[in-house]
Image: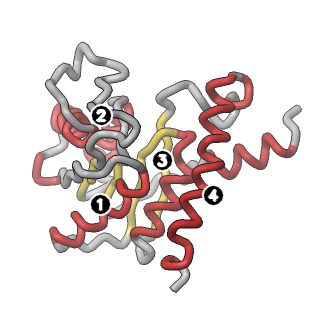
Amino acid sequence: MQSRIITDISKYIFVDDELQKVDAIFLPGGSHPEQPEYAALLYREGYAKWIIPSSGVSVKRDKWPGVRSKAEIYDGDYHSDCEFFTDVLLKNGVPASAVIGENKSGHTRDNAFLSRVVIDEKGLEVKTAMIVCKAFHARRCLMLYQMAFPDVSFIVRPVHCYNITKDNWYTTEEGIDRVLGELTRCGNQFVVDIKNYLK
């Protein structure tokens, strides 16, 4: 039986909403193809009109880290998360006209706010949106995208890229580090934008 603290952290971090049709799917940066593969599936099934992959190179590194899984399928000379995600989307049946990339950001906050810049520049009307992200990244993504798009109604659809789930994160050192790290970053990054968000 889980203690209440584990249960409460799990409920907070691992957002998982019911699937529904939206105007756009946002893809915060990453190097696992499972994220854009799932987004492509949802696009093909008619769940969204546009997909917005995001991110250049992480601020933690000076170059793109490479494909984390299925490198035998996705073997391009990628230089950014956005470039990689775009290739995965195209290879999985998403037309180029539906992909609107953002390739300058280096962390999650900028994934959200620079995606807003791209959407505004394109003149797209987005009233509803979905975030497809790593499962343990869900709360922070939702928080930051909601701040960047305060008038948009969001849902989150998580992808399990690291085998870190709501049910097992507290059983491994890596899971604990990642989830508690997310908890800390949610607080730190919320402080940066809360005053603007509440205006």
Q: Nearer the viewer, residue 20 or 184?
A: 184
Return the residue at label 2. Answer: 62
Q: Is residue 2 above or below residue 8?
A: above
Mark 3 belongs to which amino acid?
Arg
Please give the name of the residue rendered at 54% of the width and 59% of the height, measured from the top-left corner: 189
In the displayed orientation, state which residue is furthest to the top.
72
Return the residue at label 4. Answer: 187
Mark 1 belongs to which amino acid?
Ser
Q: Residues within 10 Å of mark 4 (few under 14, many from 20)?
A: few
Between tags 1 and 4, which lies in front? 4
Quadrant that contains the N terminus: top right
Mark 3 and mark 4 lie on one chain; the one further toward the N terminus is 3
Return the residue at label 3. Answer: 157
Mark 2 belongs to which amino acid?
Asp
Between the residue at mark 1 and the residue at mark 4, the CA separation in whole angstroms equals 22 Å
Mark 4 belongs to which amino acid?
Gly
Helix, strand, or loop for circle 4? helix
Res 149 quadrant in image: bottom left
Q: Are marks 4 and 2 in contact (CB under 8 Å)?
A: no
